[in-house]
């Protein structure tokens, strides 16, 4: 359980450390690649996912959840970048910025 909390904290800090100062008007999106069999995804959903929509980051980069089985249909250009779950990707106007 301690490892899950550490992972969740790391992911949250990653999200919090993103700089949204450039191109404020450009549409950004936080993509969350998840799986129903991923215990870390489930823990993230319980601890952070349920609160994310209320943060200032959500206003600048709304969260979009994609099941790992749907990546090749939803975002075929990044299918090779996704090797497991959870995977978090930042997009701006359809272009991947960071993961």
Image (cartoon, rainbow, N blue to C red):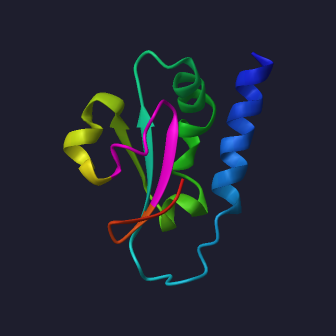
Q: Residue at x 42, y 38 (%)?
A: 33
Image coordinates of residue 34 in percent, x first then y, are 43, 31
Image coordinates of residue 46 in percent, x first then y, are 57, 27
Q: Is residue 85 magenta?
A: yes
Image coordinates of residue 71 in percent, x first then y, are 29, 39
Asked if 4 appears above or below 8 in the picture, the reply is above
Q: Is residue 92 magenta?
A: no
| Picture quadrant where residue 11 is located | top right
Q: How many marks?
A: 0
Residue furthest left in the image: 73
| Picture quadrant where residue 66 is located | top left
Image coordinates of residue 17 in percent, x first then y, are 71, 61
Q: Residue at x 19, y 42 (%)?
A: 73
Residue placed most toward the observer, 20 or 70: 70
Asked if 46 appears above or below 33 in the picture, the reply is above
- The secondary structure that most of the magenta stretch takes on is loop
Q: Residue at x 60, y 24 (%)?
A: 43
Does residue 29 appear left or right of residue 6 in this picture? left
Residue placed most toward the observer, 97 or 46: 97
Q: Please state the extent of the stretch shown in magenta in the rendering.
A: 78-90
Quadrant of the drawing holding the N terminus: top right
Does residue 10 appear left or right of residue 42 in this picture? right
């Amino acid at each position: 359980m301690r490892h899950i909390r550490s992972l969740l904290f790391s992911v949250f800090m990653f999200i919090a450390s993103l700089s949204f100062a450039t191109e404020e008007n450009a549409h950004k999106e936080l993509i969350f690649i998840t799986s129903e069999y991923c215990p870390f995804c489930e823990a993230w959903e319980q601890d952070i996912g349920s609160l994310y929509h209320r943060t200032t980051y959500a206003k600048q980069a709304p969260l979009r959840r994609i099941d790992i089985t749907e990546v090749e249909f939803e975002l075929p250009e990044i299918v090779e970048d996704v090797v497991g779950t959870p995977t978090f990707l930042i997009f701006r106007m359809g272009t991947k910025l960071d993961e």
